[in-house]
Image (cartoon, coloured by chain):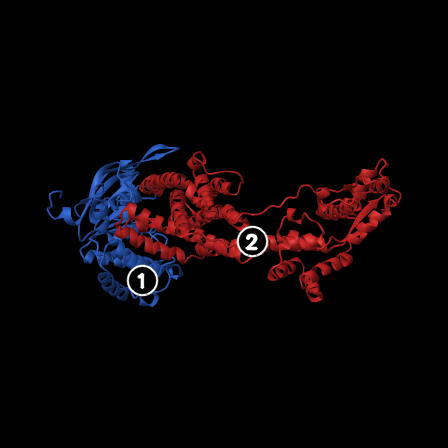
Amino acid sequence: MGDDPGLGDTGVKAEGLVKIFKDKKRGQVRAVDDVSFEAHPGEVFGLLGINGAGKTTTLRMLSTMLKPTSGDASVCGFSVTRQGTEVRRNIGFMSTATSLYGRLTAREMVVYFGKLNRMHPDKIEKRMKVLFELFDMNEFADTRCDKLSTGMKQKVSIVRTVLHDPQVMIFDEPTAGLDVLTSRTIVDFVRQCRIEKKCVIFSTHIMDEVDKLCDRVGLIHNGKLLACEPIEDLKSYTDSGRVEDAFVKIVEAKS
Amino acid sequence: MNSAWTVFRKELLDVMRDRRTLLFMLVIPTLSIPVLMWITSGAMTHFLEKLAKEKVDVLVLGQQHDPKLVDELRQRSNPEKAGNRLAKVLEQYGLGEKELALVKGEGKEAFVRLLKKKNVDPKEFIGKVMDSVNARDFDATASNIATQAFPPNFRIITKLDRHPDLSPDDDDYKDVLLNAVRTDEIAAVVEIPKDSMKKIKDEDTTRITIRYLETSDRSTMALKGLKRIFKSMSKRMAIERIKAHGLPEGFAAPIEIRAERLPGPGLLVKLMSQFLPYMILIFSFLGALYPAIDLGAGEKERGTLETLLVAPVSRLSLVLGKFGVVLTAALVSSLLATVSLAISLQAGFLSDLSVLSGEAFSFSATEAITAIVMIIPISCIFSALLLALSIFAKSFKEGQAYASPLQMIIILPALVSILPGVKLDWMTASIPIVNVSLALKEIFTGNLDQHWAHMALIFISTAVVAGLLLWFAAWWFRREQVLFRS
């Protein structure tokens, strides 16, 4: 797969990512330990693991918020360690921790991030118009973000994430703590991204979501990537054919 | 740089929509000074006037030793009688009953305003009222002038109700007096010596003792009033004695002192140059404080930091944009404080000042520009420091906890401008914050010409420190341990 000529320019390729944190009590902690995987355009790559497994740290390295202790990753052909700005220009990143600026209106919020992505004002306007229409947001476009409901906020976040039309979308537990309807908006949106041939990386600890959304799954535990295969292969690990059973079996076998 | 500008504009819009920031940046620097002045001077005037109007009892012991002297004391401490003298003096200035009534009714402030309106030199006026040739020795603040024009209001009593036979020879004499003053039964005690009449008759000196309590305002005010009355009685007697001997009036006053102010900066300038540097530094810090915490720790607390960090902007642009907003707040806040202080002083919130000086606090373009040039780098230091602290903090509360000790560290050196006698020299010019405080003081006093070399040193050293701190803040903002502290 590594010799796929198109991959380098459109997908994500992590090679031996390691992140060591220094902790006062526990000393050195290998939060992410030699993680390598590839994610391709038009597929949803799921990063599955329990809390504290290293999902967030991995995704933060992919989005250049954290520097890998060793190893590297490329996003659309740009190195996360050496070409941070270019990487960020090509990703849309969304997590429960990526909140909105409460004192800005939905429109101001979106325009601000358009500008930070160096988009031309006319292009921002055009694209915003389409997206606001698509997500039915015109009603609250000029309302301050702190006055919006959770669902409305998620829509603004989505628009903020895709405004610059990135090739790679990274979702870090985007549905954590959301109600059914709001999660649904996001799940639908992830599917839409796949249709648009974007490369999607999606982390979660909810087995069900993996089953519903992902084409391939990376199973991460204690910082190590224990398995990385198509969802169907994963499910065939146990007789039940359920992701959850496969997860438990693999974790017990390998750790 | 383009992104830094984008960040700057967004952050400015953001903090301007925050009521707390607006309060710290605009409202507090504008209002705190006049309100503080108004409260302190207004309350002081109020209570002093109340004290002055109040009739207080003064115990005179030994009246029998010199009834004439005590009688004159009684006359002079009676506002009605003294008012007549005031009326006479007013007449000399072409002022009549109407003005006297006005003055009596409205109190000191109105009285001093009236004098000023009629172009009467307050000192000369007091001199006439007190028939003292040394009137120029008195402090010429409005309250002093008025206090002197309005006689003290004493009721002279000759014995205490509960100790009618009290005598200075008693063992418990001082204890009884102390108790009487403490309970506000009397304000002070005047002891007339046994040989008083003889001494005066012999053209000698009679030694009168006044006993008072240092901690009681009523008592110390009574002491002042009594001193004034006796001083003026003494003057009268001296003149009588000199005349009786056919000597010239100046015989008993070989030296007379007149303190004449040079036509330079006066009291208003002095006060401004003392308080303004302190105000500017404090409000620069306070103005920066809130936006800094909002733009650093606030991002973490509200969970917007990651949103911002995944945007394709360099960390340097983020820091510069945020720093620009904090600096703007610091400068706006200190500028407002300056304007507010200048207006308050000239509008006469400190009425004493406006009356006596009639001077204006103004400075030349060079002075204004130099002051601004001195303020900018120190504000940069505050902004960079606060921003760095704030980025480190995980929450608003934590940010404020870090900023409070910093505030104490900054207030103390800034206070130097208020201390008397600390001068700007090569030593003080090399102490951070102290040097800017003193530099501003010299600028506002009008001594800029003597200190160009100091100013250059202070500007360069402060600017270098500011640059280093800004560089530090930018480096700080790149550290994962700072941004993702857990």
Q: Which chain is blue?
A: A
Residue type at the position of mark 2: Ser
Quick check: B35 left or right of B395?
right
According to the image, label 1 marks what residue? A107
Disc 2 designates what residue?
Answer: B357
Host chain of mark 2:
B
Decide which of B258, B306 is in the foreground and name it: B258
Q: Which amino acid does label 1 sit on?
A: Arg
Q: Helix, strand, or loop for circle 1? A: helix
Q: Where is residue A88 in the image (x, y as percent from the top left)?
A: 24, 49
Quarter of the image for residue B435 reads: top left
Crowding at dot 1, Cα within 10 Å, few <14 / some 14-19 / many 20+, comes out as: many
* Direction front: furthest residue: B246
Question: Which quadrant, please, contains the C terminus of chain B?
Answer: top left
Residue A89 locus on image (x, y percent): 22, 51
Foreground of the two, A102 or A2:
A102
